[in-house]
Image (tube, rainbow, N blue to C red):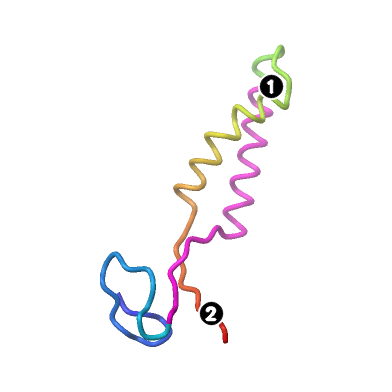
Amino acid sequence: MNCPFCGTVINQGYTTCAACGAMRVKQVGCLSQIIIFSSILVVSVLITKSNPRMDFPSALFIAGIPLAIAGRIFLVRKVWMRKMP
């Protein structure tokens, strides 16, 4: 893998470029956040419609935890960031 800023070869397993100091970080995009939030709301509404005795905040909690974890696992991308002097 090469650094996108200086072109130095970076070995597997390293997240920092030795030449320029760029770091590979995890980042959640705006579209990913929208997908996660809307899917949590939709599943919460479906849970409350299917079970009338359950209120919306508890359904939001029940749906929010697994969907937020799944979104964190599948929708997070790794990008290179460079510190500006």
Q: Identify the image quadrant of the C terminus.
A: bottom right
Mark 1 / mark 2, whichever is N-terminal: 1
Which residue is pictured at 35% across the width and 81% down the height? 18
Q: Which residue, given by chain and number where applicable, does mark 2 sit on?
A: 83
Q: How many angstroms separate mark 1 from mark 2 (CA)?
A: 46 Å
Helix, strand or loop for the magenta stretch, by majority = helix
The secondary element bearing badge 2 is classed as loop
Q: Which residue, given by chain and number where applicable, does mark 1 sit on?
A: 48
Name the image quarter holding residue 4. bottom left
Q: Identify the image quadrant of the N terminus.
A: bottom left
Q: Residue furthest left?
A: 11
Percent across and percent down for residue 19 are: 37, 85
Which residue is pictured at 39% across the width and 87% down the height? 6
Which residue is pictured at 66% across the width and 25% down the height? 59
Which residue is pictured at 52% across the width and 34% down the height? 66
Residue type at tag 2 = Lys
Name the image quarter holding residue 7. bottom left
Report the magenta residues as a range.
21-47
Q: Nearer the viewer, residue 84 or 6?
A: 84
How many discs appear?
A: 2
